[in-house]
Each structure stands twice: as structure tokens, then as C-alpha cells.
Amino acid sequence: MPITLPNNVFRARNPLPQPAVTILGLLTCVIVISSCGTTSSPPATSRPPAPTSTTVVSPHSASRSAAAQPSTSAPGPSRQSASNTHPPSGTTFAGEGLTAQQSSDLQQAVDNGHQPWRLDRVQVAKVFAQQRFGWSDSQAETGAPTVVFLTGPDGSRIALHLTQPATRGDQGIWVVDSGVWG
């Protein structure tokens, strides 16, 4: 005989606010990554370069004309050296840093057929790592619905937290909100 439960049994009475969920997600990522026991490189003794800016481009075609591509410049840290040095495990870093207006403009551009890769969270994570860290070939694993784990060519690992800031669901763009070194 099947057991039936009222519809509200699994609903939280006071759901956590979004910042708390994000922090819990990042902490979970740190724990998961740090338990991997990666020993491919020693912790870096220096800090990464200071933030400047990042420009988003298509991972498939850099030859499209600039007129066909909407501007998607985003404030954020510049690309770091592709060397084996990186911050210690557990060090967090900022994501793309798009404003609400930039996210809205980017969503509209994708809705109009530009940058369709923005609809794939793994592709967004890989392009972010390529631009930020110079990782031309990274391996991806998905975690929670908003987390992508990447391993760089030198064995370095990061966990990225992504959001859909404009439209949610299959037609919503993905943006890197933050990350943590593993």
C-alpha cells in the first residue's frame, strides 16, 4: 500500500536567502575539491594579478565581425598566468561581475541568436577559465545545478558557481558568479 504525504511536507517554512545558499554551495565545493587530495603543484607564494577587465567572446568563432557581436565587456579580474602557480586551496575569486543591465543586454543578444554557447553552463565555465586563467584545455564535471568543477591542463582545480541572472531555464544565459580554488 503506497504512503501518501501532504504536498507541503518537503517545503521549507523559511527558505534560506540567496546569499546564504550561495555561501553554502561554495563551502560544499571547497570541501569536495579539498577532499580530492590533489598534489600536482605546491601552493603559490604570491597573490594573483589585480583585477582589470574581461571581454566575453565566442568559444567557437573569433572571426565573426565585431558589428555582429554585441558588446559584452564585463568588469572583472584579468587573465592570470597559465603557469603552475595558483592561490592556495580554498581561495575564492570573483566571477564575471556583470551588472543587471549587462546581464539583460547579454540575454537579449542571446535571444537574438548571438553567443548561443551562453545557454550551456559547462561552455560558460570553460570560456571563463580560458579567459581568466589561460586554460585552453580544461576538463569539466558538473556538481549541483549551479556548480561546474574544472581541472586545468596543469592539474589545478576550481569550482565555479554560475547563475542565470536574467531568464531562468533552458533559454536563460549562464554567468559565472564566483569560484574557489581546489
Image: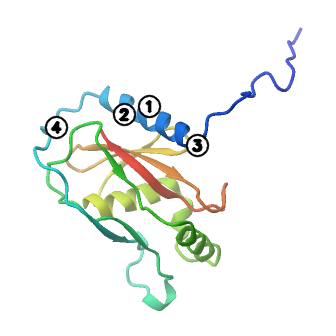
Q: Earlier in the sequence, mark 4 or mark 1?
A: 1
Which residue is labeled 2 in the image?
30
Query: Marks 2 and 1: CB-CB under 8 Å?
Result: yes
Which residue is labeled 1 in the image?
28
In space, the residues marked 2 and 4 are separated at their CA atoms by 17 Å
Q: Does residue 178 appear in the picture of this structure? A: yes
Query: Marks 3 and 1: CB-CB under 8 Å?
Result: no
Q: Quadrant of residue 76?
A: bottom left
Which residue is labeled 3 in the image?
18
In space, the residues marked 4 and 3 are separated at their CA atoms by 34 Å
Which residue is labeled 4 in the image?
40
Label 1: which secondary element:
helix
Q: Earlier in the sequence, mark 2 or mark 4?
A: 2
In space, the residues marked 4 and 1 are separated at their CA atoms by 22 Å
Which residue is at a point 52% across and 64% down the rendered structure image?
A: 118
| Residue 13 at x, y percent in the picture | 74, 27
